[in-house]
Amino acid sequence: MNMLIFLALVGLAVVCLSMAMFVPVSQPRLKYSTMLKRRVQALADENKEQAQASIFRTKKLDALSPTLRHIETLPIMERVAFSLELAGSKLYAYQLVFMVGFITLVLVVVSWLWLYNIWLSLIMLVVPSLITWLKLKRSYLNRLSMYEQQMPEALDIMKRGLQAGYSFSDTIKLISEQMPNPIGREFALVFADINYRKDIRKAMTGLLERVPSVSNMALVSAVQVQRETGGNLVENIDKLAKIIRDRFKFNRQLRTLSAEGRMSGWVLVLTPFALFALIFITTPGYITELVNTKEGHKLLIAGAIGMVLGTWWISKIIKIEV
């Protein structure tokens, strides 16, 4: 019983720590783009009031009871909620934390009571949080990629709206009505933010914080420069749309040219597993020595560490940021 209580407490600590790490790891584009990171930080420093909760977040909190609203506004829950918003999830932060904690507890108890394996129980402490982290990261990257693909068409709508005499906020509303998610929802939030705060600069800064992409940074910069110094915003938006389309075209060409490198990486990663299966079929005695002896266990651990490091290094080599 004491062991189960200890594992439950460790599991709770692992879940809380993993939740706290979601925001930094769910924004890889910020990590890889130093220029974008500096720009976002500069805009955040100039707009201290932007740190307050978004309108979308405030509306979600209004639907909760006072107790749940207090839990949802805890610092760690705010970080989890921001990660969910980046991934496009409709879950509340407390719901995600409860689900991950409950699944972790069930897996730990089952693995301990069924197999009596302390190492497997410790692994089960990490697996649900890791899977959740990977799912949020994948959802965020897919949403960011889809947003950037929709950006040229949204800029075309903005350009035509400005040429027709619409105000800038009305063109934002046009995009939110005519474009699908995720860009339609994001621009709807921008339009609501403009109506609420009456400040286009802060609303566009909020958009950049929610969707930290290079294309968004260029749009926000063009809008802010035009509002501060003047200029032809329609011409700048038209040039920006062409640049983004050329960037996507170059990216597709780059993926085609680098396909051989990615295939080589997959071959190098999968070859040890194929050799293991082949040896197991042809000479099972070798595998028995490897699995049933202490020396074999050491070799397996060393091989696993080497595989992880090698896979990580290969992924860094074949991945080219555009």
Image: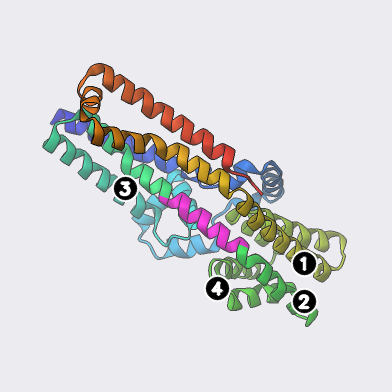
Label pair 2/1, CB-CB below 8 angstroms: yes
Residue depicted at 70% across the width and 69% down the height: 155
The residue wearing badge 2 is 162
Residue depicted at 47% across the width and 65% down the height: 59
As helix, strand or loop, the secondary structure at mark 3 comes to helix
The residue wearing badge 4 is 180
For marks 3 and 1 on the same chain, the one whose residue lies earlier in the sequence: 3
As helix, strand or loop, the secondary structure at mark 1 comes to helix
Instruction: Give the image location of residue 81, x and y in percent.
Output: 45, 53
Mark 3 to mark 4 CA distance (whole Å): 31 Å
Q: Nearer the viewer, residue 270 or 145?
A: 270
Label pair 4/2, CB-CB below 8 angstroms: no
Residue reaching furthest top? 295
The segment highlighted magenta reads 135-148
Instruction: Give the image location of residue 66, x and y in percent.
Output: 37, 58
For marks 2 and 1 on the same chain, the one whose residue lies earlier in the sequence: 2
For marks 3 and 4 on the same chain, the one whose residue lies earlier in the sequence: 3
Residue reaching furthest front? 282
Mark 4 to mark 2 CA distance (whole Å): 21 Å
Label pair 2/3, CB-CB below 8 angstroms: no
Q: Amino acid at mark 4?
A: Pro
Q: Amino acid at mark 2?
A: Leu
Query: Which quadrant, please, contains the N terminus?
Result: top left
Tell me the tag on residue 100: 3
Q: Amino acid at mark 1?
A: Ile
Vertical relation: 156 (above or below) 98: below
Q: Is residue 242 visible?
A: yes
